[in-house]
Image (spheres, rainbow, N blue to C red):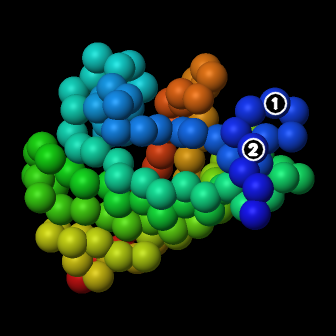
């Protein structure tokens, strides 16, 4: 198996590392980086196609402030660089225990390997 991380035939991209600024995966109330931080996103993204800019994502949205403090939502699905990623909410913890639903995302700003995504989550929980 060969992995190429640069050039026109790249097969792997470094998205984030432990040395990056910790605000990279912040959940904020709005798109402005100065917006109030309400949580963190813990994500594993796997690019599995050379034909399209898409990835399989598994993400935990962990809330650290407000009425959802200590709760999380888990989202799984295909994320495309363009368009409106539609991913499935497959579970949660705390206030979101046994959650189901879907998440719609929209990239509103992208520069290099950094992006700001606006998400709307539609959640049913018991």
Q: Quadrant of the C terminus?
A: bottom left
Label 1 sits on a secondary structure element that is: loop
Instruction: Identify residue for label 1.
Output: 7
Q: Is residue 15 left or right of residue 4?
A: left
* Residue lying at 21% horizontally and 72% vertically, measured from the top left: 93
Q: Is residue 100 left or right of residue 14?
A: left
Task: State the image coordinates of residue 27 (x, y, percent, origin top left).
Answer: 32, 39
Image height check: is 96 above or below 64?
below
Label 2 sits on a secondary structure element that is: loop
Q: Quadrant of the N terminus?
A: bottom right
* Residue lying at 57% horizontally and 39% vertically, measured from the top left: 14
Image height check: is 104 above or below 110?
below
View extreme (front): residue: 1
Q: Which mark is residue 4?
A: 2
Task: State the image coordinates of residue 104 (x, y, percent, origin top left).
Answer: 56, 53
Is residue 81 at least partly visible in the picture? no
The reply to whether dot 1 and dot 2 touch (C-beta < 8 Å) is: yes
Task: State the image coordinates of residue 9 (x, y, percent, origin top left).
Answer: 86, 40
* Residue lying at 46% horizontally and 38% vertically, measured from the top left: 16
Q: Is residue 114 left or right of residue 43?
A: right
Q: CA distance from mark 1 to mark 2?
A: 8 Å
* Residue lying at 61% horizontally and 20% vertically, measured from the top left: 111
Residue 55: image quadrant is bottom right
Residue 82: image quadrant is top right
């Amino acid at each position: 198996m060969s992995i190429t991380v640069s050039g026109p035939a790249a097969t792997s991209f470094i998205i984030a590392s432990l040395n990056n600024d910790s605000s990279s995966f912040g959940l904020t109330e709005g798109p402005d980086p100065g917006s109030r931080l309400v949580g963190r996103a813990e994500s594993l993204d796997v690019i599995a196609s050379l034909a399209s800019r898409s990835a399989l994502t598994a993400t935990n949205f962990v809330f650290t402030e407000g009425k959802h403090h200590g709760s999380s939502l888990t989202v799984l699905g295909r994320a495309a660089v363009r368009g409106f990623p539609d991913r499935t909410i497959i579970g949660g913890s705390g206030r979101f225990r046994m959650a189901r639903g879907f998440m719609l995302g929209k990239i509103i700003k992208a520069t290099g390997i950094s992006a700001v995504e606006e998400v709307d989550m539609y959640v049913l929980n018991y």
